[in-house]
Image (cartoon, rainbow, N blue to C red):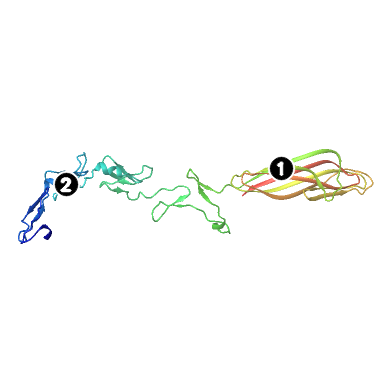
Amino acid sequence: MARCGCGGGQCNCSIVAGEGITIDGSGSTANPYIISTEVTCDQVRPCFSAGDGAAYDPSTGVISARPSTDAGNELEFGSDGGLMVPPAPVTCDQVRPCISAGPGATYDPATGVVGADLSGEAGNNIVIGPDGGLYVPSGSATVTTGCGLTGDGSASAPVTAATGTWPYACDVATYGGGVYCDTAGVLRTDPRSQATYTQDQINQQYPATAVPPDSPGIPIETRTLQIVNPDPCREAFVICEVEVDVDFDLPAGSGASYGIATDETYYVANTGATAQQDAHVQTTKVYQRTIPAGGTLNEPLQIIMGRGTGGATYNRIQSFMRAFVFNL
């Protein structure tokens, strides 16, 4: 240490120990200065404190876990000094609310007893046997049948519908009707077939009115028949039959025609020398209609006249409208 005036194996520098520092040695090569410091536990421990979940003893410096003292806390120290939560015992009161009974079973949440639920319906033969098991007495599976059923329910004689022999030449699977069960459990067939009939007749007088000369004829009057399908299930097939009769007054050399809808059904001519009064013929037309289930049809009858010549007139129109309604 030349700058400190070292020589002859000794340094003449002045070294002073501060707080917490110690200096040993003379500064010679053989006995150098040793500067040291010592930090004690008492100095360090005040630097630490405990937070949540931890405990600290500043007098010993021991840090440890701090279990809560709240009621119900299961955390504790194990035999090896580690933290441990012992397995919680499961009580019957905790488990029983998790269980309930479904079809065919009973359950008592107060006792935890599960049992079989026996139906109280008439004819049920299952019982609890003397050994506590489910028991059906021998032979109780058979039944007594009545009209429309055969068999006793055993393996050799199962219950079946008593049916007749299909007497028709057609295929039963294709043309046979259906059998159905209603809400009361009664067997039903397809809706019954039915036929109904309705008609209307009008016989009306007119002042002498000229027959129009048009050919073909033109509409003179339209009459209507209301036809109701009484079946709420099926479409109705309707046969309509209409009749018209017109009285013509025909001077000598005159002629006239009438018709139904677009068809001229009658023409008459007076080729004589004297007038003809109330010349008439009743004509008929037949056709078919369909009406939806439960529906109503207002069927028109249009009466046409034409080919009037020579002063021909008409004075009466009589009509019949008939409907034959079938639900099959």
**Number of residue marks:** 2
What residue is shown at x 75% (from left), y 40% (from top)? 201
**Position above or below: 33 against 314:** below
**SS at mark 2 in the image:** strand
Foreground label between 1 and 2: 2
Q: Label 1 belongs to which residue? A: 225
Disc 2 crowd, CA 10 A, few/some/many (<14, 14-19, 20+): few
Question: On the rendered structure, is 191 left or right of 114?
Answer: right
**SS at mark 1 in the image:** strand
Where is residue 102? Give x, y as percent. 35, 45
Question: On the rendered structure, is 22 left or right of 88?
Answer: left
Question: On the rendered structure, is 282 left or right of 36?
Answer: right
What residue is shown at x 82% (from left), y 38% (from top)? 205
Q: Which mark is residue 64?
A: 2
Q: Nearer the viewer, residue 26 or 206?
A: 26
Q: Nearer the viewer, residue 102 or 11?
A: 11
**For residue 42, what is the image quadrant?**
top left
Q: Amino acid at mark 2?
A: Ser
